[in-house]
Image (cartoon, rainbow, N blue to C red):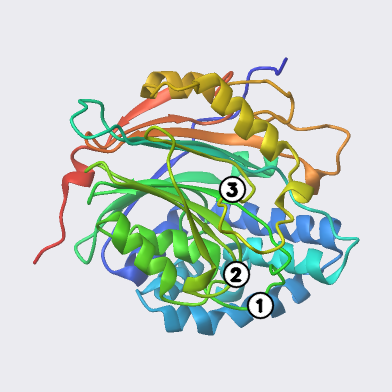
Amino acid sequence: MPAPTDHATYPHVRVEGGPHERGLAYGAATRSRVEASIAAYREVFEQGAGWDWSRVREVAALYEAPIAAFGGGYLEELSGIAEGAGTDLTDILAINVRTEIMYSAKARDARAAFFGGECTSFALAPQSGSDRPVVIGQNWDWLPHAFETVVVLEAVREDGPSFVTVVEAGLAAKAGMNSAGLGLATNALATAADVGEPGVPYHVLLRAIFDCATVTEALTTLQRARRSSSANFLLAHEDGSALDVEAAPGDHSRLFVSPAAAGVHLHTNHFVSPRFDGEDVSLFAMPDSAVRLERARAQLGNNTPSAEEMRALLGDHAGYPDAICCHPRPEYPPAEQGATVASLVMELASRTMWLADGPPCSTPFRRLDYGELLACRPRS
């Protein structure tokens, strides 16, 4: 069984102002963690793909134009992060398009490794008339170096919804929730079409979802530009609406919506929509994905669990170490190891987040009350 975690609670960073101002404050507050992230990915790409940093930067720079065209001030935020962290925009682009570069490397060189583990996500949207709240969350499984780079970013805004996201320092966003009552969880996916063709990258799309007020707006956001990589976007709203959207690279026609089972959405790291008609290589890259999904389904049965029951499920070790609660395999190269670096459960109506700063089997969940911060609304 795993040993208790010994890393510290992830730091909280609160920013405000316009896009560049928020990015500047974010980068300045997390400078050492951004530097650690850049250094870690420099090593990961070198060891896992044989790509030196100059090649990574060359590919990353190709994403600047699609991000700028997507609008929303996201390039300004990234530029601010770079300035605040004392690095240049291309380095920040490189870590924000790490997903696209990793799969691009694999597509271009069969010897390249698949990187790390990935995630188990859920959303609970009780039927109309139920007094149970909407709950969404996930285990975030990634490379173990992320234990030293994750932060809790709290953005207070007047130009859109305020939001909270648990994210690697320097990246635009990951899972979280906003002041409009929208929650987001996510999973990596991989198809044969993931060849690194520049488009709007995954982590910028995650950030853009926090600008949305409803699940419908979030789906519209995913449709409005060409996406560069595959991913799963699990969306839920305090009003009871929820939707799971599997995305392959491309336009609106490459989005695949999956229905809930008795008000419960569960997702891991492979396509499950019967409409998906591409070549899914997710199970080749992450074969534990199918096992984790079936384990979660079996544990829940036909029940609609509570937030407390979901926190318990996220600590499950069936299939250890490649379990819902994931732990590294010491015999693997560093670029191919995975661990649950954070576990989060969010009750959207109350704006409450329970966060485990590491594997939930051995890391207590902290209860974070964002009722005040996420009650804020943008000025009319």
Taking the spot 83% from the left edge, 55% from the top edge, the residue there is 113
Residue denoted by label 1: 197
Give the Cα distance between marks 1 and 3: 24 Å
- Find residue 342 and report its horizontal and vertical position in percent: 54, 35
Give the Cα distance between marks 1 and 2: 9 Å
Q: Is residue 138 left or right of residue 330?
A: left
| Mark nearer the viewer, 1 or 3 | 3
Q: Quadrant of residue 375?
A: top left
Mark number displayed over residue 272: 3
- Find residue 251 and report its horizontal and vertical position in percent: 51, 75
Q: Amino acid at mark 2?
A: Pro
117 versus 340 height, above or below? below
Q: Amino acid at mark 1?
A: Glu
Do the CB atoms of the residues marked 1 and 2 lie less than 8 Å apart? yes
In terms of sequence position, does the residue under pointer 1 or pointer 3 come before the other?
1
Where the N terminus falls, by quadrant? top right
Do the CB atoms of the residues marked 1 and 3 lie less than 8 Å apart? no
Taking the spot 15% from the left edge, 55% from the top edge, the residue there is 377
Give the Cα distance between marks 3 and 2: 16 Å
Q: Residue furthest left?
A: 380
Mark number displayed over residue 298: none
Q: Quadrant of residue 238?
A: top left
362 versus 220 height, above or below? above
Q: Amino acid at mark 3?
A: Val
